[in-house]
């Protein structure tokens, strides 16, 4: 009789998986959301990380404080184990406030533009750089101009984020190459420095920093971002007076690498201890704001996801980890180290979820994985629709979890409503006061819910 019943269960789970889990999973998700929205800790944690510790660029004392804080926070929550992974990180410092000034213009006079150095950039030193400007709308048009038009000048990259993309991340992706690679492309043609239009969806006076990568063997030249308003003004001024000059001054520098850490909290699995589901964000942030959205939100949501599952008494089969990755912003060393150690220690990572698109209202989850994994994720969508979360399965993972892909890990990106994200991203405006408690908590709950479902059913045909 029992065998017959087991056979019946097996048959119905093949024929109609939804019917088998529907009721109890709905209840479980309700418990997860209720616990997060009534006893949630993510907002309080983010308040501390943002306001007491603040901006925490890799290698800084603030980054070290964030490591210690998150370790203690997860220990106080009573996770089974909390540990650190050593990782050497770059240590870039901004130094004194940057200056970008339009000068030597008889008709327009002298005026300041709002600017900040790009991360990893060399500085100009005390003497600054003075030169004429050549405006381009991206790397391709720079190359077409050739050395004769670029040598001895400051290159002004002025491509906008395309507002017709509904995904602001697609707009960012379409413009960010000039920020990342523009300096070396310009230096290759003899430019003295570059200024780059901020990667922003809006027009204002706030410059957006972000990482640049120098090409090996090419002279390192200073690179700064100017605000979108300043970029518009500069472009207009150049049309009126093409021979005007720019004075730029920055004092940033790259110091020797520093020892830092990924911070990991773990709830041990009951029957599949050696298999992992991880949920994470990056603990480092840029130095200008307090990194509340990028990516303090992702860190506290990850810790909260584990806290909630523990608090409602859920005992996972797989081991579940909250991972605070170090150095996503200007090196990705933490993400690379995590994957390296997972491989070395033969930890099988079933799935990795990353929240790094801001602490806004959840919309869904993106995925990098097999068709089977995508089908499984889509199969769970009805459970989330009650919570207004419906956008499942578009391609995308996360920078820090990316290196796990080659180990067969299913990568999942938390997808909030990011329409306002690029007004704040990498700026002085990315601060805790722009965080909405309820939106942050809904995100944390949705991540916890997905961890629960992956733990219970597996993903990609693996369980
Ligand atoms: Zn980020």
Image: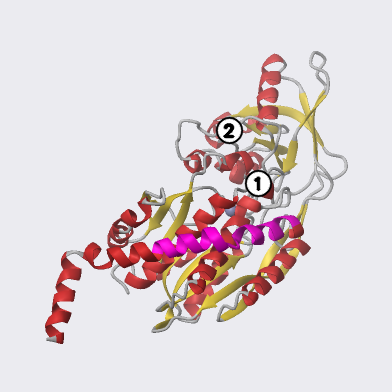
What is the x, y in percent for residue 219? 69, 48
What is the x, y in percent for residue 154? 71, 33
What is the x, y in percent for residue 410? 39, 64
Label 2, secondary structure: give it. Answer: helix
Residue under the image location 61 percent in, 38 percent down: 423
Label 1, secondary structure: give it. Answer: loop
Left or right of 190, for residue 137: left
Q: Residue furthest right?
A: 126
Left or right of 431, for residue 313: left
Q: Determine which residue is flagged by label 1.
A: 426
Residue 45 among magenta residues: yes
Residue under the image location 46 percent in, 30 percent down: 164
Q: Earlier in the sequence, mark 2 or mark 1?
A: 2
Residue under the image location 54 percent in, 50 percent down: 439
Compare residues 191 and 295 and report the one nearer the observer. Answer: 295
**Where the C terminus falls, by quadrant?**
bottom left
The span shown in magenta is: 29-51
Q: Is mark 2 within 8 Å of ligand 1?
A: no
State the scheme by which the image is colored: secondary structure
Left or right of 47, for residue 79: left
Q: Which mark is residue 142?
A: 2
Closer to the camera: disc 2 or disc 1? Answer: 1
Residue 191 seen from this side: no
Compare residues 216 and 326 and report the one nearer the observer. Answer: 326
Magenta segment, prevailing SS (helix, strand or loop): helix
**107 w.r.t. 85: above or below:** above
Residue under the image location 80 percent in, 13 percent down: 107
**Crowd band around label 2 with a 10 angstrom C-alpha radius: few (<14), some (14–19), many (20+):** many
């Amino acid at each position: 009789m029992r065998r017959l019943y087991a056979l019946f269960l097996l048959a119905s789970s093949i024929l109609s998986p939804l019917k088998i889990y529907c009721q109890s999973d709905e209840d479980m998700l309700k418990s997860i959301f209720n616990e997060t929205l009534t006893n949630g800790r993510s907002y309080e944690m983010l308040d501390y990380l943002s306001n007491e510790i603040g901006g925490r660029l890799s290698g800084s004392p603030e980054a070290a404080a964030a490591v210690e804080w998150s370790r203690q926070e997860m220990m106080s929550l009573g996770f089974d184990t909390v540990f650190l992974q050593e990782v050497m990180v770059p240590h870039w410092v901004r130094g004194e406030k940057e200056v970008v000034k339009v000068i030597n213009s008889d008709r327009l006079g002298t005026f300041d533009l709002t600017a900040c150095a790009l991360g990893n950039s060399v500085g100009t030193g005390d003497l600054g750089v003075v030169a004429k400007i050549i405006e381009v709308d991206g790397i391709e048009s720079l190359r077409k101009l050739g050395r004769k038009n670029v040598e001895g000048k400051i290159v002004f990259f002025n491509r906008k984020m395309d507002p017709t993309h509904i995904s602001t991340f697609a707009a960012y992706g379409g413009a960010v190459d000039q920020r990342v690679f523009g300096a070396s492309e310009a230096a290759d043609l003899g430019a003295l420095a570059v200024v780059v239009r901020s990667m922003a969806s809006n027009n204002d006076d706030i410059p957006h920093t972000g990482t640049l990568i120098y090409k090996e063997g090419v002279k390192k030249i200073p690179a700064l971002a100017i605000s979108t308003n300043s970029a518009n003004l500069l472009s207009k001024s150049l049309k009126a007076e093409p021979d005007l000059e720019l004075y730029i001054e920055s004092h940033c520098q790259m110091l020797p690498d520093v020892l830092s850490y990924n911070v990991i909290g773990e709830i041990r699995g009951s029957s599949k201890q050696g298999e992992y589901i991880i949920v994470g964000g990056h603990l480092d942030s840029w130095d200008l704001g307090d990194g509340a959205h990028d990516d303090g939100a992702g860190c506290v949501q990850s810790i909260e996801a584990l806290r909630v599952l523990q608090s409602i008494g859920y005992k996972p089969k797989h081991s579940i980890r909250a991972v605070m990755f170090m150095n996503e912003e200007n090196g990705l060393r933490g993400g690379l180290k995590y994957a390296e150690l997972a491989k070395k220690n033969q930890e099988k990572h079933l799935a990795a979820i990353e929240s790094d698109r801001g602490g806004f209202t959840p919309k869904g989850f993106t995925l990098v994985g097999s068709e089977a994994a995508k089908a499984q994720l889509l199969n769970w969508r009805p459970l989330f629709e009650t919570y207004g979360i419906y956008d499942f399965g578009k391609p995308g993972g996360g920078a820090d979890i990316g290196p796990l892909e080659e180990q067969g890990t299913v990568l999942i990106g938390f997808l909030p409503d990011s329409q306002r994200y690029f007004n704040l991203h990498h700026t002085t405006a990315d601060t805790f006061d722009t965080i909405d408690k309820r939106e942050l908590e809904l995100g944390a709950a949705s991540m916890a819910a997905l961890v629960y479902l992956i733990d219970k059913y597996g993903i990609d045909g693996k369980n």
